[in-house]
C-alpha cells in the first residue's frame, strides 16, 4: 500500500470518527436538553394557600379555577394545596411545609396579612416567589391580584343610599365590616364611608372577626335591641356571609330594610330574589384565578411579569411596592341576575330557582 493511499485511508477514518463523535455529541446534547426541559417542567412546583372554607367561593371556585389554569399552562406542574381554616398560625405552618416540599412559588390568600409577613420574608430569603391572591399580604410580595376593594365599598355604599332614597335621614343604619385582620375589609370599609358619611346616620358599627356569620347575627340582634327596630332604616354588610347572619336577625325581629353584601353567593342571590337582601357585589372568580395562576407559572419559569399582567402598583401595609392587577367589580340586584351570575356561568337558573324561589324567579324573568 502506498504512502498516499494510507494517508487517504487515515484521513477518511478520522473524518468518520469525527462525524461519529459529532453525532454522539448531538445525541448527548439532545438528551441533555431534554433532561433540562424535563427538569424545568418539574420545577413548576406551586403551593396554593387559601384562608378558609366557610365562604363557599374558595373550595367551589377559586381552588379548581386556579388549579385548572396552572395545569393548562404547565401540564406537568406540581400543586400543593393548603386551607388554613381561618387560623393564621396554621397558615404560617403551611408556608413552612410548602417551602420544605420545594415549592418555587406560593399563591397566598392570607388569613392575617400582618402576621404572615414573617413567612413571606422567609419565602423571599429562600428565593421563593409569592403571589398575593385576593388579599395583599405584608412583606416582600412579588405580585398581587384582586378586585378594586375600595371601589367595592363605594358600590355597596351607593347601592344602600339608592335603596334608602328619601329615608336616608329618617333613622340610622348599622354597619357590619369584615375581619380586622383582612386588609380588604379595611378598604371596603373606607370605600363605603367615603359614600355614606354625611348622608346617613350610623347608629352602630362593627368589625366582625373571621367574617363569622354567627358573630354578625349576634351583632345585629344587639343593635336592634340597643337602637330599637323602628329606628333602623338600612344595614351595610361587607359580604354575603355576614349578610346571612344579619338577615336571620332582621327576620327574627320582623324588620325588612335594605341590606348589602358581596361575593354573589348562591344564598345571597336567593335572598335578593325574595327581598331579604338588596344587592351583592360580584367579583368573577375565574379572571382573578386565571391571572394568579398565570403569574405563578411565569414566575416559576423565571419569566418577568408583563405590563399586561401587572398594569399597576399597590403599597402593602408593610410599605412594600407590589406589581398588581386590580379587576373591576359588578353590582348584582334583582334586575340583572340573569345578565350577571347566570350569563357568566356562576350558577344555572335551576340552581337558583329551587321550588322555594320559583315564583320569585318568574317575577325576575329567570327561566
Image (cartoon, helix red, strand yellow):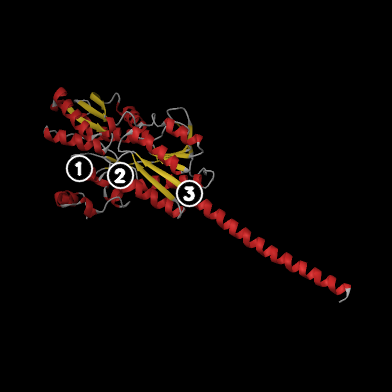
**Quick one: SS at disc 2?**
helix
For the point 27% across and 26% down, the residue is 199
- Residue located beneath label 1 in the image: 271
| Quarter of the picture holding the C terminus | bottom left
- Of the numbered discs 2 and 1, the one sitting upstream in the chain is 2
For the point 81% across and 69% down, the residue is 10
For the point 19% across and 50% down, the residue is 361
- Residue located beneath label 2 in the image: 57
Distance between mark 3 and mark 1 Cα atoms:
42 Å
Total count of labels: 3
**Above or below, 357 relative to 203:** below
Left or right, 77 with reference to 237: right
Instruction: Nearest to the eye among marks 3 and 1: give it.
Output: 3
Residue 43 picture location, percent across and down: 50, 49
- Residue located beneath label 3 in the image: 44
**Quick one: SS at disc 3?**
loop
Q: Quadrant of residue 213?
A: top left
Amino acid at each position: 500500500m502506498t504512502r498516499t493511499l494510507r494517508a487517504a485511508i487515515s484521513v477518511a477514518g478520522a473524518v468518520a470518527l469525527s462525524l461519529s463523535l459529532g453525532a454522539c455529541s448531538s445525541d448527548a446534547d439532545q438528551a441533555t436538553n431534554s433532561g433540562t426541559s424535563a427538569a424545568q417542567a418539574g420545577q413548576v412546583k406551586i403551593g396554593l394557600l387559601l384562608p378558609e372554607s366557610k365562604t363557599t367561593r374558595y373550595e367551589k371556585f377559586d381552588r379548581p379555577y386556579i388549579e385548572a389554569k396552572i395545569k393548562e399552562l404547565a401540564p406537568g406542574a406540581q400543586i400543593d394545596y393548603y386551607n388554613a381554616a381561618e387560623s393564621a398560625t396554621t397558615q404560617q405552618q403551611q408556608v413552612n411545609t410548602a417551602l420544605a416540599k420545594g415549592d418555587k412559588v406560593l399563591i397566598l390568600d392570607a388569613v392575617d396579612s400582618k402576621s404572615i409577613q414573617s413567612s413571606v420574608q422567609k419565602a423571599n430569603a429562600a428565593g421563593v416567589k409569592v403571589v398575593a391572591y385576593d388579599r395583599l399580604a405584608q412583606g416582600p410580595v412579588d405580585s398581587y391580584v384582586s378586585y378594586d376593594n375600595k371601589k367595592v365599598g363605594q358600590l355597596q355604599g351607593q347601592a344602600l343610599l339608592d335603596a334608602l332614597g328619601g329615608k336616608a335621614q329618617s333613622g340610622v343604619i348599622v354597619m357590619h365590616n369584615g375581619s380586622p385582620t383582612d386588609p380588604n375589609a379595611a378598604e371596603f370599609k373606607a370605600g363605603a364611608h367615603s359614600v355614606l358619611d354625611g348622608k346617613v346616620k350610623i347608629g352602630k358599627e362593627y368589625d366582625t372577626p373571621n367574617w363569622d356569620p354567627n358573630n354578625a347575627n349576634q351583632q345585629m340582634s344587639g343593635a336592634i335591641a340597643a337602637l330599637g327596630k323602628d329606628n333602623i332604616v338600612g344595614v351595610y354588610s361587607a359580604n354575603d356571609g355576614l349578610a346571612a347572619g344579619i338577615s336571620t336577625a332582621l327576620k327574627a325581629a320582623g324588620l325588612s330594610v335594605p341590606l348589602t353584601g358581596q361575593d354573589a353567593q348562591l344564598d345571597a342571590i336567593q335572598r335578593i330574589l325574595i327581598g331579604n337582601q338588596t344587592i351583592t357585589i360580584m367579583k368573577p372568580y375565574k379572571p382573578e384565578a386565571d391571572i394568579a395562576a398565570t403569574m405563578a407559572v411565569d414566575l416559576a419559569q423565571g419569566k418577568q411579569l408583563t405590563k399586561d399582567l401587572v398594569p399597576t402598583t399597590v403599597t402593602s401595609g408593610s410599605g412594600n411596592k407590589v406589581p398588581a392587577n386590580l379587576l373591576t367589580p359588578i353590582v348584582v340586584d334583582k334586575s340583572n341576575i340573569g345578565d350577571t351570575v347566570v350569563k357568566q356561568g356562576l350558577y344555572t337558573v335551576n340552581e337558583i330557582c329551587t321550588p322555594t324561589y320559583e315564583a320569585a324567579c318568574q317575577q325576575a324573568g329567570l327561566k
